[in-house]
Amino acid sequence: MKLHILYFCYKIINFILTNRLFISFIIISAFVFGTDLLFTTQWNRIQGFSPTTIGIDFAPEVWLSLLSLVLGTLIIVISIASQNLPKLVDLYMQDWQSLFYVWFLVLAGTHAVLAKVRVEEDRSFLASAVLNDCLFLPLAIVLVFPYIYYILRCTKPVTVIERIFSNHLQQINLLPNPYVSILLNNPQFKSAYQFRLFASLNQLDNLLSYVTLKEAQAQIIEQITELVDRYIILKPNINPQFFLMGQEVRTDISFRTTIEFEDLERSRIFYEQKCFRLLNNAYTQFIEHHEFDLASLCVSEIYRVGITAISIGDDHLIDTTIVRFNTILRIALKHGTRNNEARNLYNFAFHYGNFISNLVRSQKIEQAKLSFHYLRLYGTEIFKYGKTSPVMYFIVDVFAAEMKKILILAHELNLETALQSELLFEMLQVDSLPNFMKDDLDKGQFVDNGVRTLQIGLALFYLKNDRPEFVERIINDIIDDLEYWGKESFCRLIEMTCKHLQLFNHHFWEDTDRGNLNIYYTPYKDYIDQFQDLLISRIRLYADNYLELDHQREELSAKELERILGRFHEQMLRYLHRFSPEK
């Protein structure tokens, strides 16, 4: 019974909100003519007015001029602004202030005409003329400039965005309300509520495509994330019925090709998924127009949502955030390889690395391992594009640097050795062969050995913190390059890499979107000599084993050759014996 009463009240409120033009007309009509009635009844008590000194002939013309000024300004301003701001007309057709003021001009002007006609017929209606000339007309004149200024200010993109955001945020804040929670059990109310939320999100998405000011575009991106954050915080207090997707949501443009509605309902993330797709589309738009800072802002806001999900322990949303990071990475990778542009990938790695670090700090171990694995997979794939897009080699180094930071964090948090070993194994999979030719090394040219440089820097960290088992694994992995390069070239390469580590400063001499920090820098330079000694001893052991194996191969080859020659000699003797003249 309570649900039916609340739904009836909702229908009344909804009727008022959807018929604002008619409701505002009723309210202003009651104000104008109610005031007239009240003033007329009190006319005999008002002193100091002489009927012979009041002129009312001018009033209708003044009202007409005032109404033309306001309506003309309103039409011109909104018509021009709506060319760049879609649905602006619809937005201001629901603006109470505008409706009240325009209806006041129309009805007060009509009141002036009626008052003039009535006074000419009967001077007893002079009170209406006095009211119009002395109260309504001055009030309208005084308010005309503030209203025009209000309209000009409200047509600014920033103001339009703020208004849509405020209305949407208000709807989100009402979701945990006890009365709204009861109403959400009604399918019609729930579907209408979901539709309004998605409609305002689509309005923000449309504005993002039309506005050209970076300030407004950044505002939209940030406010979409703010809405998601607020929604995530309130989600535990929302009626579970709200997460059952209505037909309006299922047919939304963002879900037209989606078939996993049951998964979205079960995980309760359809709203977050909608916002993620808006940010995904915005990111694609920005990188195509080379808006690097706005593209980076999109990734930063996804990271912000991920942090909120981690803070409240929403595993479904964390998994969705990981998928969204990977999707964004794929978009950036396609754009980067097509345009030989690494800047978007460079910025992306920073946010993805920070997200994984927060997973590690929050003991979300399984998600951290999975994300770390994805980071390694994409790093390995990116290396393959280096032949056609050389700048991609540096991105491999950037990914390896983020993995190094996560491994250091895992050690500082004293996580299980097995976990650290597993993560280290993933990082060592990125160590593809250095990007240079042997001729470059012979000529003394600088070579790109960035991943190895970062791995050696990590080994120095482990040396300082007395983790010899991890140092051993890194050295064993580096030794794999020995067979390819040969002992002499390999030793020169390692020596050159260690010299670079000695020379690298904490800051680079040029600025980037992430500042001028040098990703190759290591503060543990005092352990370089110790590392080189360990590596040289391992090289010697490897070389001895290699020579022994080589000697064994030579002995086996000699015995095999002797056996083959023996068999050949026996066959020749049989052949000669068969065809000898004696026979």
Image (tube, rainbow, N blue to C red):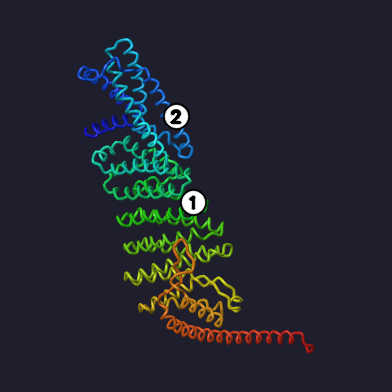
Give percent across and percent down for residue 552: 55, 86
Give percent across and percent down for residue 56: 34, 18
Q: Residue furthest bottom?
A: 582
Q: Is residue 264 above or below residue 528?
A: above
Q: Is residue 236 above or below residue 160?
A: below
Q: Residue furthest left?
A: 45
Q: Secondary structure at mark 1?
A: helix
Nearer mark to the viewer, of 1 and 2: 2
Give percent across and percent down for residue 449: 52, 73
Residue type of the residue flagged with mark 2:
Gly
**Residue receiving disc 2:** 72
Counting residues from the N terminus, which is met first, the one under dot 1 or under dot 2?
2
- Asked whether the viewer can see residue 249, the reply is no
Q: Residue at x 60, y 75 (%)?
A: 440
**Number of numbered labels in the structure image:** 2
Please state which of residues 305 and 212 is positioned toward the viewer in this rendering.
Answer: 212
Q: Residue furthest top?
A: 121
| Quarter in which the N terminus is drawn | top left
Q: Is residue 289 above or below residue 406?
A: above
Binning the other alpha carbons within 10 Å of mark 1 as few (below 14), some (14 to 19) or many (20 upward) gives some
